[in-house]
Amino acid sequence: MICRFQYSGVVLALPAGLAVATLIVLGFSPGPLPARVLAGTAVTCLALAAARRLTPRWGGVAPRTLAVRTSGEVSLQDREGEWRRGELRDGSFVAPWLTIVRWRPEGRRVDRTILVLPGMSDAETLRRIRVILRWR
């Protein structure tokens, strides 16, 4: 099953919203001002790191296309058009609102994850990928 990604900024709203809510709570909390400023800085840095991780990446380049086969083979096309091959690994997660594909590229020792959200592709393609991952 081939899935062509369409990115939007909606996924970045989650860490941003949580960070703003935490900063508001910190603003109204009692305590020394330097400690609250330090905590606010840490929350902001963690939110930026989370936002960066929520955008699917492979080697620093967001993928354009994901192909998942029933045999367990995974292929990923980056923005330059280069295809990376690998295999599905245990630990993928499937839900109607979130799909996490865990795979290991050929020749690598570390597994990678790809976050796939509704709206990144058409509903039927995402459903087929979820079925492959669920029964694999």
Image (cartoon, rainbow, N blue to C red):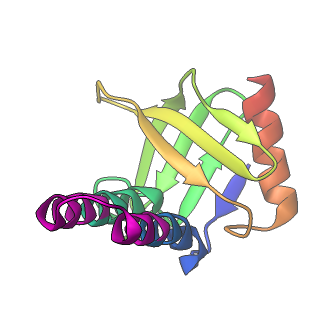
Residue 123, quarter of the rendered image: bottom right
Vertical placement of residue 59 versus 123, above or below: above
Q: Residue furthest front?
A: 30
Task: Say left or right for 101 vs 70.
Answer: left
- 67 and 58: which is toward the camera: 58
Range of magenta residues: 21-43
Task: Say left or right for 83 vs 99.
Answer: left
The reply to whether the magenta stretch includes residue 34 is yes
Whether residue 112 is visible here, answered yes or no, is yes
Q: Residue furthest right?
A: 124
The reply to whether the magenta stretch includes residue 35 is yes
- 109 and 21: which is toward the camera: 21
- 111 and 38: which is toward the camera: 38
Residue at 80 percent across and 57 percent down: it is: 125
Q: Position of residue 96 (x, y in %)?
A: 82, 49
Vertical placement of residue 45 versus 8, above or below: above
The C terminus lies in which quarter of the figure? top right
Residue at 34 percent across and 64 percent down: it is: 61
Q: Position of residue 66 (x, y in %)?
A: 58, 54
Residue 108, quarter of the rendered image: top left
Residue at 57 percent across and 20 percent down: it is: 90
Vertical placement of residue 51 versus 6, above or below: above
